[in-house]
Image (spheres, helix red, strand yellow):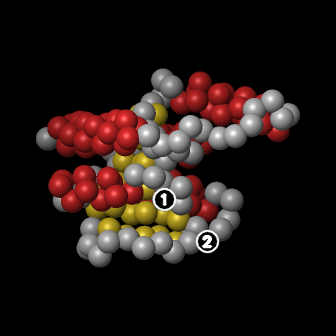
Amino acid sequence: MLHIFVDADACPVKQEIFRVAKRYSLSVTLVAASWMRIPHDERLALEVVGEGLDAADDWIVEHAETDDIVITGDVPLAARSLEKGAYVLGLKGKPFTNDNIGPALATRDLLADLRDAGEVKGGPPPYAKRDRSQFLQQLDQAINAILRKRE
């Protein structure tokens, strides 16, 4: 059965994920370094993995299967999840695919180097209402595409 895994520590769309998962009766596992409050629902689970550097990523990759959905803003986790056959959705709704993951990794590495050199300051722009809407639309499309594929 289709399962949604969420890299939950910095995920701004948890409530949206809960709402969509409820509509489709899907299970969701939030994976985090520390405890967080989640709604009481038998389809929702929280997996606290500790604070190791890639502990949440490792747990998600170990448990995700083909056609599960992984939601993350972490590009290396996205790459590892794609290798497992999961559908990967970024926090602003952009799907990670085998076609765009290479450039995404290269851009991430370039920006990290520029930040280390002091050339780039600050982080990503604030999460906007439009981002939330785009995320919801893409999550719904992903679920429907996977469910159609399974028919």
In the rendered image, residue 109, in percent from the top left (x then y), is placed at 71, 33
Left or right placement of residue 113 versus residue 140 in this view: right
Quadrant of the frame with the C terminus: top left
Residue 64 in view: no
Label 1's element? loop
The tag earlier along the polypeptide, 1 or 2, is 1
Query: Residue at label 2?
Result: 50
User: What amino acid is at disc 1?
Assistant: Ala
Looking at the image, which residue sits at the far left? 151
**Distance from Cα at disc 1 to Cα at disc 2:** 13 Å
Q: Residue at x 28, y 37 (%)?
A: 137
Look at 51% across and 25% down and name the residue there: 100
**Residue 106 screen position, x and y as percent:** 66, 28
**Which quadrant would residue 64 be assigned to in this image?**
bottom left
Q: Which residue is mark 1?
A: 8
- 4 vs 135: above or below: below
Depth order, front residue of 2/141: 141
Q: Residue at x 70, y 40 (%)?
A: 122
**Residue 23: quarter of image:** bottom left
Is 57 situated left or right of 47 in this image? right
Which image quarter holds the N terminus? bottom left
